[in-house]
Image: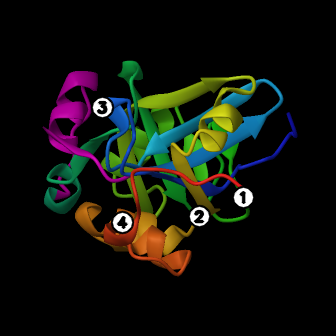
Amino acid sequence: MQTIDLTGHFLIAMPGMADSRFVRTLTYICKHDEDGALGLIVNRPIDMRMSELFAQIGVETSDDELAERPLYFGGPVETGRGFVLHAPVGDWQSTLAVGNDIALTTSRDILDALAAGGGPQRIMVALGYAGWTAGQLEEEITQNAWLTVQGNAQVIFDLPAEDRLTAATHLLGVDYASLSESAGHA
């Protein structure tokens, strides 16, 4: 199978997605190489706020807007672990630069900085991540489970969660509602 690198791309779940955890999701791929892929679902907020996360790790913040931000279901792997998708990249203890302007950080120092009024200006915090073994994502794409398009920081950070999937499909020049559950193969 041909190797592709989808780092920095969106995965748009097709309407016929068989895995219920990914139905109508938009996933941002943070790393994709010969060993597999790692991404975060960016359009599935959960019923938990940043204030609850801060309380769990013993951090206080006076930023009410930050405290009220929702956390996201980032994927079914390691759902007890936090992942901060952010821009700009910055200099944190455990950061994976996805591109020139977006990074994924898993170290607590970024949460401490955010709570204290610092840190990156644009953030999305998720619990868990989506992961694929070597060749698995490529196989799922050939089975019409996903569409791919270059990722876009504005879609992730500037739009409400419920608008992100539609906005990503518009980057391809199509409307999500017009996508078919069945695939054609030439």
Tag 3 near tag 4, CB within 8 Å: no
Which of marks 1 and 3 precedes in the sequence? 3
The amino acid pointed to by label 2 is: Gly
Q: Position of residue 147 (x, y in %)?
A: 56, 56
The amino acid pointed to by label 1 is: Gly
**Residue 164: numbered disc:** 4
Q: Position of residue 59 (x, y in %)?
A: 26, 33
Is residue 115 part of the magenta span, yes or no?
Answer: no
Visible residue check, residue 94 = no
Q: Which residue is mark 3?
A: 20
Spatial CA distance of label 2 from label 1 is 10 Å
Spatial CA distance of label 3 from label 4 is 19 Å
Q: Which residue is mark 2?
A: 151
Tag 1 near tag 4, CB within 8 Å: no
Find the magenta span and give its range: 42-63
Spatial CA distance of label 3 from label 1 is 30 Å
Q: Closer to the observer: label 3 or label 2?
A: 3
Number of dots carrying numbers: 4
Tag 3 near tag 1, CB within 8 Å: no
Tag 2 near tag 1, CB within 8 Å: yes
Q: Residue at x 49, y 59 (%)?
A: 120
- Secondary structure beneath disc 1? loop
Is residue 50 part of the magenta span, yes or no?
Answer: yes
Spatial CA distance of label 3 from label 2 is 23 Å
Answer above or below: position of 81 versus 23.
above
